[in-house]
Amino acid sequence: MSTENYDVYKDQSAAKVITSKDLSRMAWRSLFLQASFNYERMQANGWLYTILPALRKIHKNPDDLRQSMRMHLEFFNTHPFLVTFISGLVVSMEEAKENISTIRAIKVSTMGPGGGIGDAVFWLTLLSICGGVGASFSLSGSWLGPIFFLVAFNVVHFALRFGLANYGYKMGVSAIANLKEQTRKLSHAASIVGLTVIGAMTASYVKLESGLQLVRHVEGVEKPFVYSLQKDLIDPIMPKLLPLLWTLFILWRIKKGTSTLRLVLWTIVFGLVCVGLPVLVKQLFGVDIIDANVLAERMGIVVKEATEAAATVQ
């Protein structure tokens, strides 16, 4: 009675048959990684579709090809932009006719870190940087905003998609340790750039200023002395301090688990209170706590809206 070893390919003749053209074709096919996504095996169908031409070129024995395809149809899930590193690595091992269990172990051990690294690099860092710069173009009235976003993001995306396919194939298993070290450096540099962009966006797009002022009338002086909280106290300490404090407050509440919808509502209510409070103080106490011209404009708006509402009721 013969026992068949399903962990070893029958044809053990290892030959270099994969070319750079095959790797490029594999990278293009990886764009359809999630085309057949399902909740049982996630990206397994798209993963097999990505590497199938290479497997057919490597395994001339039908039984070996069948075994390889069966193994690659098992559960698979990673970041869709970094999948080519795993596919290049796996194809190099298939070409060397490594044991099926070894190939499976490498595939499973790399798809988790690939998903975590991809989310950090692309969704949390690159997307924020490209989106922030593109938004700044759009807010200034330039049509380059969406074009810059799409071009900049996809240049990095496709460079990594094709570059990692070749890197994973050429380096083999040794690429795992090298990529881990390089990724750590890349993540650190990207975090610094991302924080710089977010800081610049906070100063540019978060509008929060204090109009509070202290008015003191001095006997014998025609013009009263006006002490502005924003210009005379906050700006000398640190310009754009209030937008920074509000951003840090929002960040703190997010870390505490406050929902985004609630934070938006808080921001709206805070803005309405800041706008309406000086008007209320003026009407109740006759005191100007903000610039008189701004206050007159707000009170004019309030009076106009009240008049229109009364006319509508009548």
Image (cartoon, grey):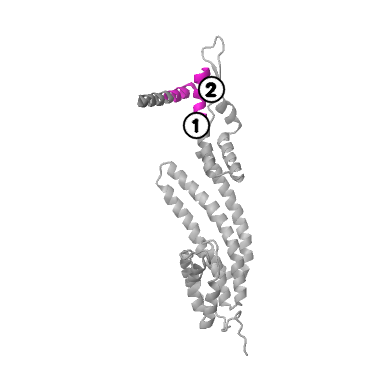
Task: Name the residue rendered at 50%, 74% in the picture.
Answer: 54
Q: Are marks 2 and 1 in contact (CB under 8 Å)?
A: no
For marks 2 and 1, give the CA distance.
16 Å
Residue 308: quarter of image: top left
Say which mark, if any, is on residue 164.
none
Q: Which residues are magenta?
A: 271-300
Residue 49's place in the image compared with 156, above or below, is below
Residue 296's place in the image compared with 202, above or below, is above
Residue 63's place in the image compared with 25, above or below, is below
Q: Residue furthest top?
A: 220
Q: Label 1 crowding class (10 Å Cα cut-off): few <14, some 14-19, many 20+?
A: few
Residue 33 rendering spot, x and y as whole percentages: 49, 65
Of residues 34 and 280, which is closer to you in this image? 280
Q: Is residue 279 magenta?
A: yes
Can residue 257 be seen in the rendering of this structure? yes
Residue 297: quarter of image: top left
Task: Name the residue rendered at 56%, 28% in the picture.
Answer: 230
Task: Name the residue rendered at 47%, 23% in the picture.
Answer: 295
Q: Name the residue tied to disc 1.
A: 272
Of residues 209 and 138, which is closer to you in this image? 209
Q: Is the C terminus in the top left, top right, bottom left or bottom right quadrant?
A: top left
Q: Name the residue tied to disc 2.
A: 289
Amino acid marked by disc 1: Leu
Of residues 25 and 104, which is closer to you in this image? 104
Q: Is residue 297 magenta?
A: yes
Residue 79: quarter of image: bottom right
